[in-house]
Amino acid sequence: MSSEIHRGAAAVGHLADLPALEASAVHCLRLWSDAAEGRAALPKGRSAEVLKQICGLCASYGRRPLMRHGLGCACLGADEACFAHMVAAAATGAREDALMLAALIVRPDLAPALVALSEQLGLALNRRPVIPTAPGRRAEDRAGFLH
């Protein structure tokens, strides 16, 4: 990649401002992307297997690489926001919205498969959230900060 920052990594918000389900989805994505150490920190069980399938699908059939911020970063990247919203939409039954977001991440013909997996992940995270251990800054604490 060139020295130019990829748009998918552009900060669009703060992790602390997301609902628990969406923050958990981003945190899981970051853990998975943090190699063996991060994957070892994921809760074992069905959600870890589903996340593995989601990340494999995104890596193999993504429209482009999914950009992420570092594990301890308080910022929310554009791709992370799209991923989090897709998981939440799928888990809450907003399948058309989830499908639209999935088509931004993977090839359109594979978007339904990504939505089905995202629904499973979202439902698992609703039962057992994986909240980041390092809390981000809340909106009232960010006055004067860009991100």
Image (spheres, rainbow, N blue to C red):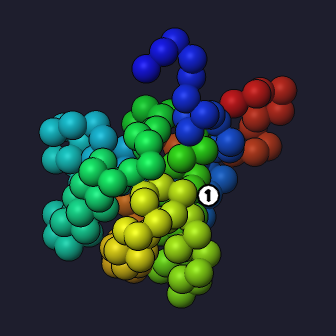
Taking the spot 43% from the left edge, 58% from the top edge, the residue there is: 106
The relative height of residue 103 versus residue 62 in the rendered view (above or below) is below
Q: Residues within 10 Å of mark 1 (few under 14, many from 20)?
A: some
Task: Indicate the quadrant where residue 37 lies.
Answer: top left
Taking the spot 58% from the left edge, 52% from the top edge, the residue there is: 81
Tell me where residue 115 appears, x and y as whole percent.
Answer: 42, 74
The relative height of residue 50 versus residue 77 in the rendered view (above or below) is below
Q: Could you tell me if residue 122 is visible in this image?
A: no
Task: Name the outermost residue toward the right.
Answer: 144
Task: Indicate the quadrant where residue 101 lies.
Answer: bottom right
- Judging from the image, what secondary structure is the residue with disc 1 in? loop
Tell me where residue 86 appears, x and y as whole percent.
Answer: 52, 67
Q: Is residue 57 left or right of residue 40?
A: right
Q: Is residue 111 left or right of residue 47?
A: right
Residue closest to the eye, 127 or 22: 22
The relative height of residue 6 versus residue 91 in the rendered view (above or below) is above
Tell me where residue 129 appears, x and y as whole percent.
Answer: 40, 67
Residue closest to the eye, 41 or 84: 84
Give the position of the N terminus as an image quadrant. Answer: top left
Taking the spot 58% from the left edge, 69% from the top edge, the residue there is: 100
Taking the spot 25% from the left edge, 55% from the top edge, the residue there is: 56
Q: Amino acid at mark 1?
A: Leu
Residue assigned mark 1: 18
Task: Name the outermost residue toward the bottom.
Answer: 93
